[in-house]
Image (cartoon, rainbow, N blue to C red):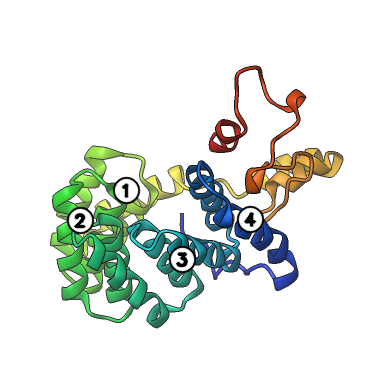
């Protein structure tokens, strides 16, 4: 789903506890590496872009030969709108692994934003060759073709998306725009109806409002950026209390299951 506007990045004060935990995890010896990568991904998903950028920069410092670390810094920067700043990180990732699909995809995203549609399609074609059923890649390819006014070609790509997921919202939305541009009134109306059918129900917020007012914990979970105060994770190699984990489970294993 596409959100209106950019997520608001957490301020510096809110980021400091996360940064401290990241510093401890990066400086700690193995086996904290796997747990670190799993734990840091949640910041980006929550919309804490500044926290995610800081965390992933530390990953590149700890393991500069790990290409996804560079890609994830670029992802955070792209989400912030820092297109130019993201370029060298993607270049570094592709220098390490030239055919890395994630790096090529985000390079295509930057090329599309800059209006270089031919370059974006070329990058997406490389990803498509590796992952022919990835509907996110196909939707992006169709979007670029739409921007080039190649509506019929875009619809052919969208047919491939439909074979993967016939309820894909982005596919129906782009198809609606293409059919309207081609003057296909009936097809455009059908795609518009399917788009309304499968898009997120915004009225659902009212349904959950009473529960969220009554339960601070549930309301906290609903926030895009939130903290969990009930359990302290054993970053930095500190052992968790024996009662906090099932028998036979190590601290590293518990952290890896986040």
The label nearer to you, 2 versus 4, is 4
Of labels 4 and 1, earlier in sequence is 4
The label nearer to you, 1 versus 3, is 3
Query: Tag 3: Cα neighbours inside 10 Å, few (<14), some, or many (≥20)?
Result: few
Residue drawn at (55%, 31%) of the image:
253
Mark 1 highlights which residue?
190
Q: Is residue 55 above or below residue 42?
A: below
The image shows residue 25 at horizontal and vertical percentages of 59, 52
Would you say 127 lies left or right of 52 here?
Answer: left
Q: Secondary structure at mark 4?
A: helix
Q: Quadrant of the C terminus?
A: top right
> Do labels 2 and 4 touch, CB within 8 Å?
no
Mark 3 highlights which residue?
61
The label nearer to you, 4 versus 1, is 4
Residue 181 seen in the figure:
no
The image shows residue 214 at horizontal and vertical percentages of 86, 39
Mark 4 highlights which residue?
24
Would you say 93 lies left or right of 145 here?
Answer: right
Of labels 2 and 3, earlier in sequence is 3
> Do labels 4 and 1 touch, CB within 8 Å?
no
Residue 54 sits in which quadrant? Answer: bottom right
Of labels 4 and 3, earlier in sequence is 4
Q: Distance of mark 1 from mark 3, alpha carbons?
A: 51 Å
Please state which of residues 150 and 81 is positioned toward the viewer in this rendering. 81
Residue 65 sits in which quadrant? Answer: bottom left
Please state which of residues 209 and 15 is positioned toward the viewer in this rendering. 15
Q: Secondary structure at mark 2?
A: helix
Of labels 2 and 4, earlier in sequence is 4
The label nearer to you, 2 versus 3, is 3
């Amino acid at each position: 789903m596409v959100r209106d506007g950019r997520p608001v990045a957490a301020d510096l004060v809110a980021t400091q506890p996360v940064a401290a935990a990241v510093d401890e995890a990066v400086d700690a010896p193995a086996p904290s590496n796997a747990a670190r990568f799993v734990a840091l991904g949640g910041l980006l998903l929550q919309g804490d872009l500044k926290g995610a950028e800081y965390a992933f920069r530390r990953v590149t410092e700890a393991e500069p030969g790990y290409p996804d670390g560079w890609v994830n810094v670029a992802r955070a920067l792209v989400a912030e709108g820092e297109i130019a700043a993201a370029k060298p990180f993607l270049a570094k990732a592709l220098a390490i692994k030239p055919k890395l699909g994630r790096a090529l995809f985000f390079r295509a995203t930057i090329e599309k934003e800059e209006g270089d549609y031919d370059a974006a399609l070329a990058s997406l074609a490389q990803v498509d060759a590796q992952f022919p059923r990835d509907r996110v890649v196909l939707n992006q390819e169709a979007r670029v073709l739409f921007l080039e006014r190649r509506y019929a070609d875009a619809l052919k790509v969208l047919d491939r998306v439909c074979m993967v997921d016939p309820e894909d919202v982005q596919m129906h939305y782009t198809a609606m725009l293409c059919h309207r541009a081609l003057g296909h009134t009936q097809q455009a109306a059908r795609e518009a109806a399917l788009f309304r059918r499968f898009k997120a129900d915004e009225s659902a917020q009212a349904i959950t409002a009473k529960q969220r007012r009554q339960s601070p914990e549930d309301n906290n979970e609903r926030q895009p950026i939130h903290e969990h105060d009930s359990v302290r994770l054993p970053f930095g190699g500190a052992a968790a209390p024996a009662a906090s984990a099932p028998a036979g489970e190590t601290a590293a294993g518990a952290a890896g299951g986040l």
